Amino acid sequence: MKRVYLAGPEVFLGHARLFADWKKDLCRHYGLQGLFPLDAELRLEDNASPPDTALAIFQANCHLIRSCDLLIANLSPFRGPSADPGTAYELGYAQGLGIPTYAYSEQDSEYHQRVKPCTESSGSADNSRFRDIEGLEIENFGLQDNLMLVCGLSAPLFTGHSNDAFNQQLSAFERCLAYLQVESE
Amino acid sequence: MKRVYLAGPEVFLGHARLFADWKKDLCRHYGLQGLFPLDAELRLEDNASPPDTALAIFQANCHLIRSCDLLIANLSPFRGPSADPGTAYELGYAQGLGIPTYAYSEQDSEYHQRVKPCTESSGSADNSRFRDIEGLEIENFGLQDNLMLVCGLSAPLFTGHSNDAFNQQLSAFERCLAYLQVESE
């Protein structure tokens, strides 16, 4: 059974372990073994400092990613218009290691729809681009997030129709699992 | 001369190429060759679609990272409490490839100071943790951002005292370059 690292901001939920169990059950249903960041074994001294605890979590997560055959990232927007940056990091890390990566978002909006534009540029060669209130370009390639997150995936990003990144239905996640099952047949 | 990939959200500035030149000049001053995402050569058909353009940029950036000896990431907060997720991705990608990574933020605040808490939990074993208005845990390890971004760096994150991630003074970035120069002696 292939091992799948389940990257995503659900580690921050109050019911993170329950949510992890839902995801793992769904993985099993599709013939995969889901591994969750909180599953990683921590090597910690008693009374470890917060930075030492953080380092142990980091090392355990990286070790767990390296032990997996593939990674599925939850790229639903988190505390802003983009995905959780910890998840973005893990996606890049897996791709650097050559591990196939898949991703989903429970929202189906495009990135440029989630950042408030300031003004339209007026008729220049640059007129298809928009800038935010700080004058920074709003990426607009018709993608669901920053191009670095979306373009290296082993399949198109799977999307759902919920505004809740953590809805129990997990429809976009399940769409990804169904794709992987068909691919493996 | 060592090649340094300059990861960061300054690619979205109106004066991105000018800002890139400032960073590259500073690199040269410290004996390093700075490479900027926009330096990557794009292989594009005429009239390429936006997604095809995005894919070409992605591939060119990854190719440029692989050609570098190290990476320096600008992790200053971008459109939210965390770093730009494209930069987070590139940081992870470089670490997956085994390329040494360094980072700076022009702000010196900790992550938990930048996310508005909802309520304090009351006296449980969990009492050092806080949650945001959506009930999601606010990471609080005394770090400047999500632990995945900070814990794999080859040196501590360098910080400045500006609220402007793109200030021309580039003091935190220069502190990082000075560190690398001393290390190489």
Image: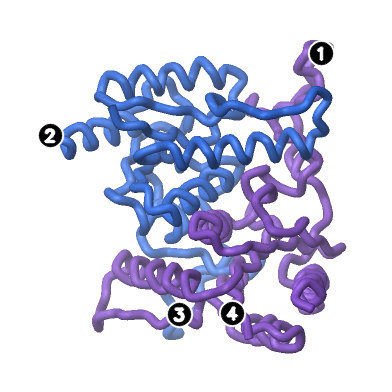
Chain colours: A purple, B blue
Answer few, some or many: residues within 10 Å of disc 2's Cα (few below 14, many 20 plus, some between 14 and 19).
few
Whole-angstrom CA distance, mark 3 to mark 1, is: 52 Å
Identify residue for label 3: A40
Residue at position x 78%, y 13% in the image = A125
Q: Tell me which chain the residue with mark 4 is part of.
A: A
Q: Chain of mark 3?
A: A
Of discs 3 and 2, which sits in the foreground?
2
Above/below status of B73 relative to A131: below
Q: Amino acid at mark 3?
A: Ala
Rendered location of residue A114, percent (x, y) = 76, 44
Task: Name the front one of labels 4 and 3.
Answer: 4
Chain label for disc 2: B
**Disc 4/disc 2 C-alpha distance (Å):** 44 Å
Residue at 70 percent across and 47 percent down: it is A145
The residue under label 2 is B185
Residue at mark 4 = A3
Question: Left or right: where does residue B25 sit relative to residue A94?
Answer: left
CB-based contact (under 8 Å), mark 2 and mark 1: no
Q: Nearer the viewer, residue B7 or B93?
A: B93
**Is residue B116 something one can see in this rendering?**
no
The disc placed on residue A122 is: 1
Circle on res. B71: none
- Label 4 element class: strand
Residue B92 percent location from the top left of the image: 48, 53
**Disc 3, SS:** loop
Q: Residue visible at 30% across and 27% down?
A: B32
Residue type for callout 4? Arg
Q: Amino acid at mark 1?
A: Ser
Q: Earlier in the sequence, mark 4 or mark 3?
A: 4
Earlier in the chain: of badge 3 and badge 1, it is 3
